[in-house]
Amino acid sequence: MRPSGLMIDMDGTVYKGSNVIPGAKEFIDFLIEDGMPFVFLTNNSSHTREYYGRKLTAMGFNVGKERILTSTIATVRFIKERRAGKKVYVIATPEVADEIEGLGIISTEDDPDIVLLTFDRTITFDKINKAYHFLMAGAELIATHPDDLCPTEDAYDVDIGQFIHLLSYLTGNVPTIIGKPSLLMVEMAAGEMGVEKSKTIMIGDRLYTDIKMAAYADIDSVLVLSGEAKTSDLVDLEIKPTYIVGSVADIPDLFSKL
């Protein structure tokens, strides 16, 4: 069955760090020529959508920022749709904080309704301490994604996950998490493409975010072995991808058989 649209992970799927994965540009050109709706998904909320748009363009991908859905953008839409009018204490890098405010979120450091935790590479004790006090006073904890680690070109950096655990443990606040593997990310992505979410396909390299999200949403998935997941990881899986390929370069052939 022809999918209604594709959700495509970025790091490890179409590039690794600053290096384009062979065949990835041709794959995206194939989708554009075919008229297949698609959107890039990333949990990384330390950069803006404009940043990722510039990065993809500089790498030679024929896409604009409108094809990119970061966990930040998805979270902002969630708050505007389901927490309309709420005041938000934003923990984010300066450029991401500006992006969030520019999209209409009411940002405050005075008695917020929500503490919004992103992947903040400028995080400080003061920010965490303020968040703790706001949560203890009754604010809701919302996080852009749950990742413990963020991939770099040759290693991993500490991500947002441990800060979610810290604030939740200290305050008893059960967080709302938007990014992969949350079903909320599928809803936002399908809405972005204007397609029926039940017929979308997720393409990615991480079993516990990309593939798990597809399983939660009961949609098909394609695991690429060009990033984090390796063949040795595929033994005795509880959640399995629908298809496994070496890289996105193999997907046009796969789709021709569907």
Image: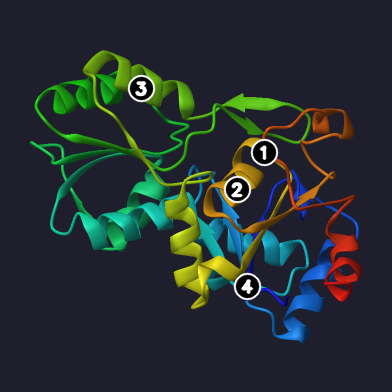
Q: Which mark is residue 124?
A: 3
Residue ID for mark 1: 239
Q: Disc 4 residue type?
A: Gly
Q: Secondary structure at mark 3?
A: loop
Give whichever of 15, 125 is nearer the camera: 15
Q: Quadrant of the N terminus?
A: bottom right
Image point 82% across, 67% down: which residue? 25
What separation in Å lies between label 2 and label 4 (alpha carbons)? 16 Å
Residue ID for mark 2: 215
Which of the two discs, 2 and 4, labels the residue nearer the N terminus?
4
Q: Are marks 2 and 4 in contact (CB under 8 Å)?
A: no
Q: Callout 3: few (<14), some (14-19), or many (20+) C-alpha neighbours within 10 Å?
A: few
Where residue 32 appears, x then y in whole percent? Answer: 73, 81
What separation in Å lies between label 3 and label 2 (alpha carbons)? 36 Å
Observer-side mark, 2 or 4, equals 2
Which of the two discs, 3 and 4, labels the residue nearer the N terminus?
4
Where residue 165 appears, x then y in whole percent? Answer: 39, 20
What separation in Å lies between label 3 and label 4 (alpha carbons)? 40 Å
Q: Is residue 61 positioned above or below 147 on the image?
A: below
